[in-house]
Amino acid sequence: MHVEAEWPAGPGTLLSLLAVPDQGRQCLHEMSLVSPEQLVKSQPDYFGGLGPGSPYWVELVAAYQRYAEGLCTAAHSEAALREVYRDLWREKLAERDMDAALKLFRTPAGRRWVAAQNEVVREAPERIGETRTPLLTQALRRLQAEQARILELYRRETDKRSVPAVVGQARP
């Protein structure tokens, strides 16, 4: 069995047997953590006063949604991921080992292993996301608190500079 002929994602090939993780949904979920709605919920002045009551809000939210969907689609397309997996398998496994693995995967035990492996691949991104989401949320809250603190210091400093001093009175 020639490996090059096995590598396209046709029936009976390694790539047709093994699932590729769907990371697009997890990507969209993680992007929702930093959506305009979430940002103004935790920091109302995040967009300089632009918020849900503004006529431009719908435009801002739609632009972010297009950005998130485009990014997640491009970064996690099944075709691109399959290409990466194909290239990695080519690098990591010799042709004779590939032949042996494919023979094993066609046995009843091998088919059970493939089925279990595919379930793991499908469920892993969600499980990983479940543990990562609270960490991302906490990190974002810390960042936003720090940004708010820095912006407040900046505003105070700017306000001090813009208030003219009264003659004969020192500025604080």
Image: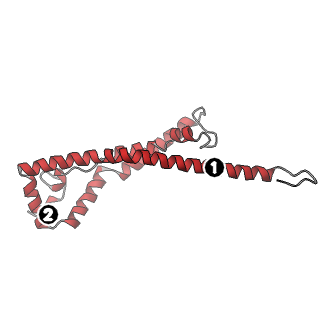
- Considering the numbered disc 2 on the image, is that residue within a helix, a strand or a loop? helix
Q: Residue 117: image x %, image y %?
A: 19, 50
At x 27%, y 44%, the residue is: 123
Q: Residue 131: image x %, image y %?
A: 37, 46
**Callout 2 environment at 10 Å: few (<14), some (14 to 19), or many (20+)?**
some
113, 59: nearer the viewer: 113
Q: Quadrant of residue 59?
A: top right
At x 78%, y 51%, the residue is: 160
Determine which of the numbered discs, if any, sits on residue 149 in the image.
Answer: 1
Q: Residue 22: image x %, image y %?
A: 30, 47
Which quadrant of the rendered structure holds the N terminus?
bottom left
Instruction: Check disc 2 and give the amino acid type.
Output: Val
In this rendering, does residue 67 appear at all?
A: no
- Considering the numbered disc 1 on the image, is that residue within a helix, a strand or a loop? helix
Is the residue under label 2 in contact with that under label 1 (CB below 8 Å)? Answer: no
Residue indicated by mark 2: 3
Instruction: Check disc 1 and give the amino acid type.
Output: Arg
Q: Residue 129: image x %, image y %?
A: 36, 46
At x 32%, y 45%, the residue is: 127
**Callout 1 environment at 10 Å: few (<14), some (14 to 19), or many (20+)?**
few
Circle 1 or circle 2, nearest the eye: 1
At x 46%, y 41%, the residue is: 65
- Picture layout, residue 153 above or below residue 40: below
Q: Name the residue at the top extreme.
A: 53
Labels 1 and 2: the sequence-earlier one:
2
